[in-house]
């Protein structure tokens, strides 16, 4: 099995995922972008969400399978992605406001220097 692959998660698929002899493998959900399950050599299966925030990869632990179901993992992942998108939007607005303030300050500074 490759180090990572994409499958449609369901109970049967997750139950049949092989345990690596050493290390860990990641399998990604085909339905929710960034949702993955990590399988360790000890047999532990844990859901994670992988996404980028400010161009940096971010890993968010959702919970262990089967305590967290596929549906719950997808719901949590989608909510977290929505929160991250809202944070990005707020950051974009703050940056736009700062750029506008800077442009205004530069324009006023240039006008006052040339008006005298």
Image: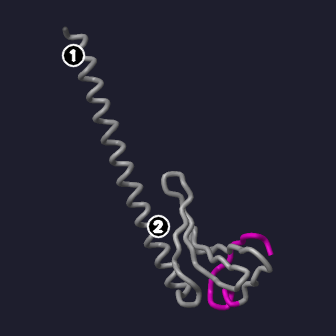
**Residue 39 point in image, percent of width and height:** 68, 79
Residue lying farthest to the left in this orientation:
116
Instruction: Answer with left or right where residue 47 lies relative to residue 14.
Output: left
Q: Which residue carries the number 1 mark? A: 112
Residue 14: say if magenta: yes
Image quadrant containing the N terminus: bottom right
- In this picture the colour scheme is one colour
**Residue 103 point in image, percent of width and height:** 31, 30
**Residue 52 point in image, percent of width and height:** 53, 58
Q: Quadrant of residue 31?
A: bottom right
Q: Quadrant of residue 67?
A: bottom right
Give the residues in magenta: 1-15
Instruction: Answer with left or right where residue 103 lies relative to residue 18.
Output: left
**Residue 62 point in image, percent of width and height:** 51, 77
Q: Which residue is drawn at 45% across and 70% down?
A: 80
The one of 58 and 115 positioned closer to us in this rendering: 58
> Count of labels shown?
2
Report, in whole angstroms, how far the alpha carbon at label 2 lies from the one at label 1.
47 Å
The one of 76 and 62 positioned closer to us in this rendering: 62
């Amino acid at each position: 099995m490759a180090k990572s692959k994409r499958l449609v998660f369901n109970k049967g698929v997750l139950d049949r995922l092989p345990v690596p002899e050493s290390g860990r493998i990641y399998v990604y959900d085909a339905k929710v972008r960034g949702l993955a399950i990590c399988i360790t050599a000890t047999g532990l299966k844990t859901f994670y969400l992988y996404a980028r925030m400010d161009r940096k990869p971010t890993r968010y632990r959702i919970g262990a399978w089967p305590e967290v179901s596929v549906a719950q993992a997808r719901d949590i992942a989608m909510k977290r992605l929505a929160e991250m998108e809202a944070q990005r939007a707020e950051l974009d607005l703050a940056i736009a406001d700062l750029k506008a303030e800077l442009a205004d300050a530069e324009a006023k500074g240039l006008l006052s220097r040339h008006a005298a």
